[in-house]
Every structure is written in structure tokens, then in C-alpha cells.
Amino acid sequence: MGMTEAAILIALMTLVTYLPRVLPVLLLSRRTLPAPVERWLSFVPVAVLSALLAPALFAPSGALDLSFDSNPVFWVSIPVFLIAIKTKNLFITVIAGMVMIALYRLLLL
Amino acid sequence: MPIIMGYLPIGFAFGILATTAGLSIYGALAMSIFVFAGSAQLISVGMIAAGAGIAAITVTVFLVNLRHMLMSAYLAPYLGRLTPLQQALFSYEITDESFAVHSAFFRVNGTPPAPELFALNASAHLAWVAGTLIGAWIGGRLTFDIDAYGIDYALPAMFIALLVMQVEHRRHVVIAVLAAAIGLALYLIGLTQAYIILATVIAATVGTFFAPEEKRGADSDLAQ
């Protein structure tokens, strides 16, 4: 990809990334939202992170796959979930996950 | 601090993948400085490597990042004290990770003073750019099998940790499982760009109408 093309692409990506991030804050921050809307928004964090994560765990190559041999991510994620619940620590969870997946691939595959 | 440590390896992975996909080190850096969107950047370099056009990549990035609209709407009530310029700057830094950290903190402690807000965002952004720089520098010099080192797992591991940190009530677990099931189903039937936002909207709507209110007093996020 050439310099000009890359520059145009990055400018467009910046625009389509920034608009959804900024408009709701600018439009909604000075109003009181109706209670049902607030309740709806209270579910957004868990729902969005969970939806984001599901295909990466259950279908990393595009199709449902829970095999020991081809989807180590699913199997490693079980202890990683437990570590996250126990420690509530981002750094420990990420490092433990990376070490476990590397060991899994090295020793078990 | 944890957000910085979460960002470095992913920025690093992005730097390697971007230069491997044929983006220059400056292109990779510019993308991390201006766009600042983890998964969208990773998807875009994947598409560049696959030879996709600018229009297709832009549309994909838009769809992938549309979820930030929901996050921005969630954070909005907490940002009423900021000036519009501060709000515009803050919004520039809304990512999955900063959202997860801010939303968890706001709900418990309210909005911290502006300098604290921007310190967290700036250090996260800096870590992302630094990770990109190191990755791009290395990626341009040697061929690197990132799977062998578990670097590709940094992103899922981070989302697992951030998801767990968001769960405060049993009904959050129910909605998380529902969102995962819907998201996975939509993804498997081919909605590979829109599944996140669709699953979030459906699960949050179900939660609003069907998840029982917890007993009064036990419900910290409604007790403010």
C-alpha cells in the first residue's frame, strides 16, 4: 500500500472511528436520561464485552470449534476466567493467559 | 497501570502485523496515533494484507467501531461537568479498554477531576503508540511467528479480565451469557461485522425488560 493510499485510509478510519465516539457524549451529557434508557445503558458494558469475546473463544477460525488440538484458546480461557474472577487484575490475567497459551502450544500440540 | 500493561503487547502485535501486511513504520504509527482502535486496526491490517480496497476497509472499521457509540452514550451522563472541548478530547480516547476502566470507576466513585481522566487516557494512548513502534520496528527487521509466543492471546485475555471486572450482579452474568450466545450465533451465520452491536442491543433490551430488579439496598448501581 502506497503512502498516499495509506494516508487517505488512515484519515477515513479516523473519521469513522471518532464520530461514533464523540457524538453521544456531546449530545447526551447535559440531559437527564429517562430511567429505562439508563437501565438499558447499564447493561451495555457486560453485553458489549461478552459479544466481542464469544467468537474469539468458541470460533477463532470462523467455525464453531471446541477441539483440544485446534482451539487452545477455548481451553486456556477457562483457567483465565477463573484467574480473572479471583484476582480482578488486568495485568496478571493477560500475562497468565499469554504464558498458558504459549505453554499449551509448546507442550501439548 | 494495568491498562498500560494490557496495551503494550497488543500494540506490539499490531506493529508487527501492520509492517508484515505492507504498511510502513510511519503508517503503523500514524494509525495508532490518529485512529487508536485496537480491534479495528488489527482488522484493517488483515484486510490490507488480503488486498482489500480503501472503501471496504473504511466501512468495516465503521461497523466494527459503532459499538463505541453505545459506550459513549453510557459514559455521557458522567461527563456533564466537562467543557465541550474536554468532552471532545475525552471521546477521542474511548476504547474498549478505557471504557471498561472508566465505567467501572465512575459507577463506584463518580467522575474524577479532569486531570485524572486525561492522565489515564493519555498513558493508555502512549502505551498503544509505544507498543506499535516497538512492534513495527521489530516486524520490519525479522519474520516473527507471533502465535508461538502467545502474543495473539493478549486481546482475548484482556477482554476476559475487563468483562469479569464489569460483573456486579447475577443479572449481569445472565445478560453476558445471552450476549455471548447471540453474538456467537450471529457471527456463525455470517454477520461478522455487525454481530457485536446487534448482540449488545438485543441483550441490553432483554435485560431492561426481563431481568428482575434486585432487592432494594442490594443494588449499588441504582442506589446513587
Image (cartoon, coloured by chain):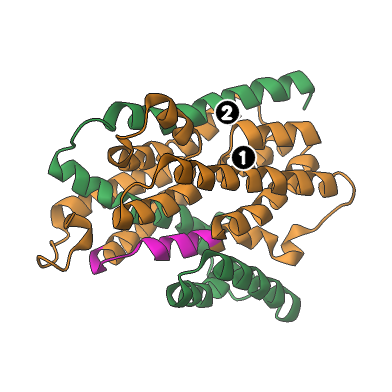
Q: Which residues are magenta?
A: B158-171
Identify the element where label 2 is drawn: helix
* Quadrant assignment, res B165: bottom left
Q: Main secondary structure of the magenta part?
A: helix
Chain for disc number 2: A
Q: Residue at x 58, y 57 (%)?
A: B155
Q: Position of residue A42 (x, y in %)?
A: 26, 51
| Residue B186 highlighted magenta (yes or no) | no
Report the amino acid beneath label 1: Gln
Which residue is identified by label 1?
A: B41
Q: Is residue B38 left or right of residue B27?
A: left
Report the amino acid beneath label 2: Met
Q: Residues within 10 Å of mark 1 (few under 14, many from 20)?
A: many
* Quadrant assignment, res B105: bottom left
Residue B33, numbered label = none
Question: How far is disc 1 from disc 2 in space, using C-alphas?
Answer: 9 Å
Q: Are marks 1 and 2 on the same chain?
A: no
Which residue is identified by label 2?
A: A13
User: Furthest-right residue in view?
Assistant: B141
Q: Output the letter for the chain in orange.
A: B
Q: Position of residue A92 (x, y in %)?
A: 57, 71
Identify the element where label 1 is drawn: helix
